[in-house]
Amino acid sequence: MAEEKKPLLIKRYASRRLYNTETSDYVTLEDIAGFIREGREVQIVDLKSGDDLTRQYLLQIIAEHESRGENVLPVGVLNDLVRSYMVPGGGMMPQFLQSSFEMLRENQSKMMENMNAINPMASMPGFEALKAQQQAFLNAMTGGLAGAWSGEGNKEEGEGDAGEKSEDLEAIKKQLADLQDKLSKLN
């Protein structure tokens, strides 16, 4: 069994500067986001108190991306997250999200291999559209990181123009919203 790699330890000094303990230099939030995109886990701790600040800084990274117009999470998902904080005990949203992303990471590369493999479905009409829709869904769910998890680039050969991507993304967003509605009715 492979040994799990320790998280990269980042220490926050009283000056609010962030210090990478592996490379002995100061880092920015963008640097930390880069480590995470590369598949590295990080842990950010306050040097003086020892408090774990990882969640606070990860949320700050997401907020900064959102403020620059890089939509990380759809508004519906953000609303559901806020609602989950109002439910006694935190609801099931955090566990659902964690399980969903774990499942996505585990199955993403296998799914793309299967879709790219030579198989009878590849000759079916509409297979390329289905493949493009699946890739758009993965990109939407992972903020474009689906390729990074499998080691592939984010661009696929033969991708359609921006209009097609936008339509595919809108269809996927609608499907996701429908699933969210069904999940909320189950509660």
Image (cartoon, rainbow, N blue to C red):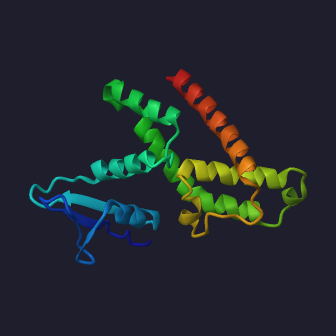
Please name whichever residue, 65 or 183, is drawn nearer the observer in this view of the structure. Answer: 65
Counting from the top left corner in percent of width and height, residue 15 is at 14, 60
**180 to the left or right of 29:** right
Which picture quadrant has residue 24? Answer: bottom left
Task: Classify the position of the N terminus by image quarter.
Answer: bottom left
Question: Please, is residue 48 above or below residue 26 in the view?
Answer: above
Can you give x and y, in whole percent of width and height, for residue 6 in the image?
A: 32, 68
Residue nearest the observer in this picture, 161 or 128: 161
Q: Is 168 displayed left or right of 26 in the figure? A: right
Q: Residue at x 80, y 51 (%)?
A: 129
Using the image as rendered, state which of residue 56 and residue 5 is in the foreground.
56
At 82% from the left edge and 67% from the top edge, which residue is drawn? 118
Q: Residue furthest bottom?
A: 23
Look at the image and tell me whether residue 92 can be seen: yes
User: Does the rendering let one see residue 41?
Assistant: no
Left/right placement of residue 114 relative to residue 99 reads right
Task: Say how many tags the image has.
Answer: 0
Please identify the quarter of the rendering in which residue 156 is found.
bottom right
Residue drawn at (59%, 26%) of the image: 182
Image quadrant assignment for residue 110: bottom right
- Image coordinates for residue 137, horizontal then vertical, percent: 64, 48
